[in-house]
Image: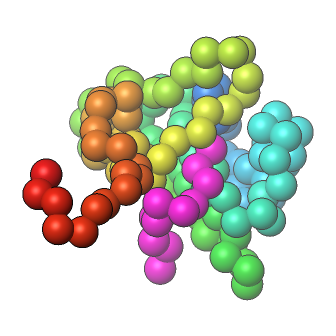
Amino acid sequence: MMQLTPQMKILVAVEPVDFRAGIDGLCRKCRQVLCSDPLGGAVFVFRNRRATAIKLLSYDGQGFWLCQKRLSTGRFKHWPRAADGSASRQLFAHQLQVLLAGGDPATRAAPQWRPVTPGVAA
């Protein structure tokens, strides 16, 4: 089972990909378009042209995980864009969870990490 943790590097492909591609085709996209190593342990997120489905690709040290979610109705309307014109955008784990639920990953949330001082009430 694949689990999303705050320590994971998550890269979202900004442009849609051909969903006929399997693991090998998506690995090729990771190397050629996203300039990343698919064996590095990152989670790569892709969407189809119609924005009705998402695929996640990750390598866990033994093999690849390929997960797909296809919406029964509607589209993924809030797909991340890269401000600097790059082919990918990095997300935090909680942002990917919001995206997978059909929400806007740019929604403001509590910071990923903040120092906690014992004995001080927030």
Can you name the residue that lies furthest to the right here? 32
Which residue lies at the image location 54% right of the left edge and 62% below the top edge?
Answer: 7
User: Which residue is more in the foreground, 120 or 99?
Assistant: 120
Query: Which secondary structure is most common in the magenta stretch?
Result: loop
**Residue 119 in view:** yes
Counting from the top left corner in percent of width and height, residue 18 is at: 67, 37
Which residue lies at the image location 30% right of the left edge and 30% below the top edge?
Answer: 107
Can you tell which quarter of the image residue 35 is in? top right
Residue 106 appears left or right of 40: left
Residue 10 appears left or right of 115: right
Which residue lies at the image location 67% right of the left edge and 32% below the top edge?
Answer: 88
Can you name the residue that lies furthest to the left here? 121
Counting from the top left corner in percent of width and height, residue 25 is at: 79, 50
Can you name the residue that lies furthest to the bottom here? 62
Residue 107 appears left or right of 32: left
**Residue 57 in view:** no
Can you tell which quarter of the image residue 106 is in? top left
Counting from the top left corner in percent of width and height, residue 19 is at: 62, 43
Which residue lies at the image location 46% right of the left edge and 27% below the top edge?
Answer: 79
Per the image, is 63 magenta?
no
Counting from the top left corner in percent of width and height, residue 69 is at: 41, 52
Per the image, is 7 magenta?
yes
Q: Which residues are magenta?
A: 1-12
Relative to 21, residue 61 above or below: below
